[in-house]
Image (cartoon, grey):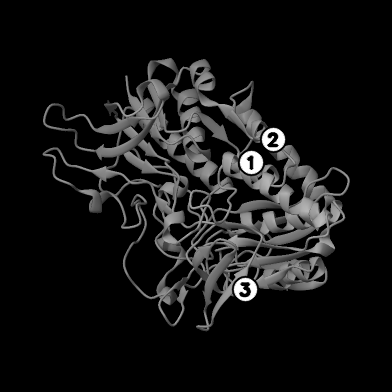
Amino acid sequence: MARILVLGAGVAGHTAAMYAKRMLGKQHEVTVVSPNSKWNWIPSNIWVGVGKMSAKQVVFPLAPVYKRHKIAYYQAKAVAIRPEGDSEDSTPAVDIVYTQPDKDGQTARLRYDFLINATGPQLRFDLTEGLGPDQGNSLSVCTYSHAKDTSFKLNDAMQKMANGERQTLIVGMGHGACTCEGAAFEYVFNVHHELVQAGVRDMADLIYLTNETELGDFGVGGMTFHMDQGEVTSEQWMGGMFEEAGIEVIDSAHVTKVDPGVVHYEQLDGSVHSREFDFAMLLPPFRGVTMQAFDVDGNEITDTVFAPNGFMKVDANYEQKPYEEWSADDWPKTYESPAYGNVFAAGIAFAPPHAISRPQATPTGNPIAPAPPRTGMPAGVQGRLVAETVAERIKSGDWELKAKERSMASMGAACIASVGNGMLNGSAATITMGPIVPDLERFPESQGRDPQQTSGELGLAGHWIKRLLHTMFIYKAKGLPFWWLIPE
């Protein structure tokens, strides 16, 4: 019997565990370790954050799903990896600390034959002074509980507007090295939509604050859409949307501090500003979760297994070189650890080799560097990919069998960004691009992307599709009949 241990139960980890168990059956053991008791379809947190969905609509308990599919489940966080085993047993292991209430703080050591690290991000609100719900000066939609609280604060602001009190609302990024600009884009337009529907838009100053050097960058360096009217850049397309909605844009910004009712930021040109606000939803930068690694003798080898930012090193080229010298070939294809062939990292857990958007800095050294996105569709594809590699190695008996490959430099992606919830008056920006990581050698004349795969469209149909995907992906994640037929 082979033992597969999956760390994390987000899109990548949950996908990997479900496929691994389906492919391997009851004769092999699949175990999931996650500090959370519930699965959260994070893209729909945007709608929770404007009061259009309840938190219950975007989550469900993990334990019943894993019990039904014969997957072992530990509500715990992984704190250390021992890929060579320890002095008592050479079988690789992971140290965990329980988070479930009846065992909170207790520890255990779980053995594995194959490890899939899909731990997702650590939300680093602490990297900006005063940022985030815990510090009390700004809000978030990163978790369903954050989003629920944010919806209450938004409703309070809308009530004040209805009573004739003008409000300033700031939505965006709380640090110059943030990722997930798409979530901030979705949220600011959903806020705009709700204000319009409530008849109070004229009482709001709505501001989008971003670390992007141009609109539509999204951490992927922007896109060029090939439409009937000719080529349109994502900056032009998004710029028109913001102008039409009357949303003020502050770009190229690094937030340095958030005080009660005031956000402070420096822009790429070195200018320093402060803006007062009544409501602020600002996303944090991400880091890999804090885990150590040890060899068989107990010596720390964290630097061998993980990059300095806490993400796991995989089969990428991590050589230090200028931005201009990076290429699509530097991105990982198998998500396999170069140090340990039975260890993989998928989704946000793997360390990207370099930025996709050109990293820049203010004169004082603050970053203006959108980080590469690795969420949603890519995370699901990677979770399935590594599960297939592991399953094939186990079933063939050849644990060195060549791993399956799927690089983000060959992988396309589709993103449906909500700009307003409503079956009759909602809308969404439907964006496709391929590949995610530009390949300038293959597509030198179109910013490294295939013109046939890169497009943008805005309309009500996009909202219907996004709402349908919400239902489909929760159905799939619950492992209901024929769940595997729904693509990643």
Q: Pointers 1 and 2 in contact (CB under 8 A)?
A: yes
Q: Position of 241 compared to 121: left or right?
A: right
Q: Is residue 433 visible?
A: no
Distance of label 2 from label 3 (alpha carbons): 33 Å
Residue 265 in the image, given as x and y percentages of width and height: 53, 72
Q: What's under tag 1, amino acid-wise?
A: Lys
Q: What's under tag 3, amino acid-wise?
A: Glu
Residue 73 in the image, given as x and y percentages of width and height: 42, 23
* Mark 2 crowdedness (10 Å alpha carbons): few <14, some 14-19, many ≥20: some
Whichever of labels 1 and 2 marks the residue nearer the N terminus, that label is: 2
Whichever of labels 3 and 1 marks the residue nearer the N terminus, that label is: 1
The residue that mark 3 highlights is: 214
Q: Secondary structure at mark 3?
A: loop
Residue 223 in the image, given as x and y percentages of width and height: 64, 67
| Front in this rendered view, residue 298 or 316 | 298
Residue drawn at (65%, 51%) of the image? 414
Q: Position of 133 compared to 3: left or right?
A: right
| Front in this rendered view, residue 168 or 249 | 168
From the image, state whether disc 2 or disc 3 is nearer to you. Answer: 2
Distance of label 3 from label 1 (alpha carbons): 30 Å
Q: Is residue 274 above or below residue 41?
A: below
The residue that mark 1 highlights is: 148
* Mark 1 crowdedness (10 Å alpha carbons): few <14, some 14-19, many ≥20: many
* Residue 106 image-quadrant placement: top left
